[in-house]
Image (spheres, helix red, strand yellow):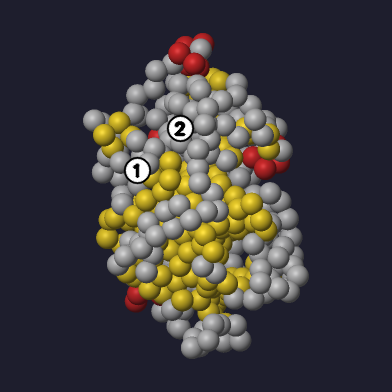
Amino acid sequence: MLRFSSCLLLGVFLWIQPACTGSIDTADDAGVVDSGGEDGMDAGGDTGGDTGGDTGGDTGGDLGGDLAGSGSILFVEPFEDSDFGSRGWYDAPSGDLSSAEHIPNSTYSFECFFEQGQRGCRGGTPGRHEFEETETVYLSYWVKYSENYVGSQRSYHPHEFHFITNKDDRWVGPAHSHLTTYTEQVGGVVRIALQDSRNNDPNCILLNNDSFVGCNGDFDSYVFSEARSVCSCNGLIGDLEGRDCFSFGDGYYSARYWDSQDQMFRDEPGPYYKNDWHFIESYFEMNSIEDGVGVPDGVIQYWYDGELVLDHHHILMRTGQHPDMRFNQFLVAPYIGDGSPVDQRMWVDDLTVATGRL
């Protein structure tokens, strides 16, 4: 099995925010949680402890390349003015706009200026946007990073964009939910991730180093119901590259992620230069439920300038506990948990959320 360094798994996706009726306040974030230096495993298999099974997955190929097609638009954000609230954004919507950086036929872009030592964008973000419930969601946007952009200089963060489902309220913190998706890049490497810590069965927890807590003393024989996490802490079903399960507060953080094989945002001028505009697309499709049991046939995909770089078709996002789980909320939430190491900027233009690839 392929081992990942422990630093990769120390609070990779953590951003805990209590339910509120105010802004997305990154100052209230719990920050990076130490998972105890436990190594994660590249493992797959069945819930109930088969951690050495098939990791599955079809990555970087053409399988399912047209699966996300024929979508209908849920909403569009052109970033042409900062009156985000009038276009359905909420949770203290704000944000700096740039007239100097934008794509052709556009006048402005959203500018996220990470000041050194700060966790979030100086001028805020558009925040959250609800949409009609759907089992499939597609995100597209143009993005550009400053020449000196270095992200967090760690193997986790910055977070960028999230989808959340109808199983949480409209103020839920994205790092502690029934399901949150992550579309981002870490050190120039594309990352798609899932987190569903609120679904954990606390009676049997599989940690990053394959040790376990509870489970009646035997993880392999513990029988999980459908009331469990799909990501990591309650077993490993479907496609899996990296995972994260560790204790925080009075619970456990449960996540899994998939990275591109190559660095897609690079320092050197060329087709992958971070200081050029690039067109990004991601797609998430809920798995089916058969006879009250979740089937790992969900889909995640990611395109970079039209190139399919992540393509997985054996994903479990929901179990029979939540057969009607659907996506209904989107967040623009760039965030660096340890604080930005330098002054740096990212720009986003012409963002679209739809039910499928357009």
Callout 1–callout 2 Cβ contact below 8 Å: no
What amino acid is found at the position of numbered circle 2 in the picture?
A: Ile
Q: Is residue 168 above or below residue 281?
A: above
Residue lying at the far front in this picture: please name it: 62
Q: Nearer the viewer, residue 172 or 78?
A: 78
Q: Which residue is mark 2?
A: 237
218 or 311: nearer the viewer: 311
Quick check: can you spot residue 176?
Answer: no
Q: Residue at x 33, y 61 (%)?
A: 355
Task: Judge the density around disc 1: few (<14), some (14-19), many (≥20) Cα neighbours within 10 Å.
Answer: many
Q: Amino acid at mark 1?
A: Asn
Measuring 66% from the left and 68% from the top, which residue is drawn there? 272
Q: Looking at this rendering, what residue extends furthest in the top direction?
A: 217
Q: Which residue corresponds to mark 1?
A: 287
Query: What kind of element bears circle 1?
Result: loop
When asked about the image quadrant of residue 111, the answer is bottom right
- Counting from the top left corner in percent of width and height, residue 84 is at 41, 75
